[in-house]
Image: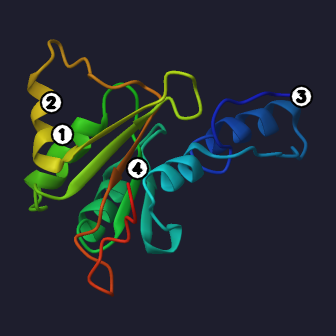
């Protein structure tokens, strides 16, 4: 038995591959409830109207960042940041640098399902500005964070947010 914190079908797949290689046989994966499912629920973000990207992995992030750039504003975004070098405020700045509307609503959902769960509601501009609030690149957010960026509108003209 190998216990993994997080979702083996999102950012945990690399760990599952390492376990399978170590035991040299197929591994049975039994997932729990993903932080992404909880984040989508808390942010009232329908999964079918969402672009999901995990940056919580090793290797080249450029294809994933490209997907975010291509979808920002048109679809909701759910992003698993990469602790500690690509945190929510870094993603916000990268999106703004690539032309995203800084007024888009952004939510940073931290430590979901824990007693000290926190949700910060802000804009992309304000979130990116938090990069300058701390020294030495330390993030003001937990390493257990999910970033949600609301679409500008859905097909019916609403953001699909419901009552937040």
Q: Which mark is residue 42?
A: none
Secondary structure state at the residue bearing disc 3: loop
Q: Look at mark 1 in the image and give the residue it sits on.
A: 127
Q: How far apart are marks 3 and 4 (CA)?
A: 29 Å
The answer to which of marks 1 and 4 sits earlier in the sequence is: 4
Q: Distance between the residues labelled 1 and 4?
A: 14 Å
Which of discs 2 and 4 lies nearer the camera? The answer is 2
Residue 133 drawn at (x, y percent): 11, 21
| Residue 72 against residue 89 in the figure, above or below | below
Q: Are marks 3 and 4 in contact (CB under 8 Å)?
A: no
Tell me the residue at 88%/46% (across/down). 28
Which of discs 1 and 4 lies nearer the camera? The answer is 1
The answer to which of marks 2 and 4 sits earlier in the sequence is: 4
Q: Which mark is residue 1?
A: 3
Q: Look at mark 4 in the image and give the residue it sits on.
A: 79
Q: Distance between the residues labelled 3 and 2?
A: 40 Å
How packed is label 3: few (under 14 Cα within 10 Å), some, or many (20 or more)? few
Q: Distance between the residues labelled 1 and 3?
A: 40 Å
Residue 126 picture quarter? top left
Secondary structure state at the residue bearing disc 4: strand
Tell me the residue at 13%/61% (across/down). 100
The answer to which of marks 1 and 3 sits earlier in the sequence is: 3
Q: Total marks drawn? A: 4
Q: How far apart are marks 2 and 4 (CA)?
A: 17 Å
Q: Do the residues labelled 1 and 3 touch (CB within 8 Å)?
A: no
Q: Nearer the viewer, residue 32 or 11?
A: 32
Residue 164 drawn at (x, y percent): 38, 54
Q: Look at mark 2 in the image and give the residue it sits on.
A: 130
Tell me the residue at 26%/22% (across/down). 140
């Amino acid at each position: 038995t190998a216990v993994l914190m997080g979702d083996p079908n999102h950012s945990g797949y690399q760990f599952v591959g390492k376990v399978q290689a170590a035991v040299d046989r197929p591994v049975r994966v039994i997932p729990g409830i993903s932080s992404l499912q909880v984040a989508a629920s808390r942010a009232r973000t329908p999964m079918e109207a969402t672009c999901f990207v995990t940056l919580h992995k090793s290797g080249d992030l450029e294809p994933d960042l490209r997907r975010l750039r291509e979808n920002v504003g048109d679809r909701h975004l759910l992003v698993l940041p990469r602790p500690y070098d690509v945190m929510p405020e870094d993603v916000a700045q990268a999106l703004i640098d690539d032309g995203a509307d800084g007024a888009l609503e952004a939510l940073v959902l931290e430590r979901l399902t824990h007693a000290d769960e926190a949700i910060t509601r802000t804009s992309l501009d304000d979130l990116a500005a938090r990069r300058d609030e701390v020294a030495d690149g330390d993030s003001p957010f937990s390493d257990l964070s999910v970033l949600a960026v609301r679409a500008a509108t859905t097909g019916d003209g609403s953001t699909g947010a419901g009552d937040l």
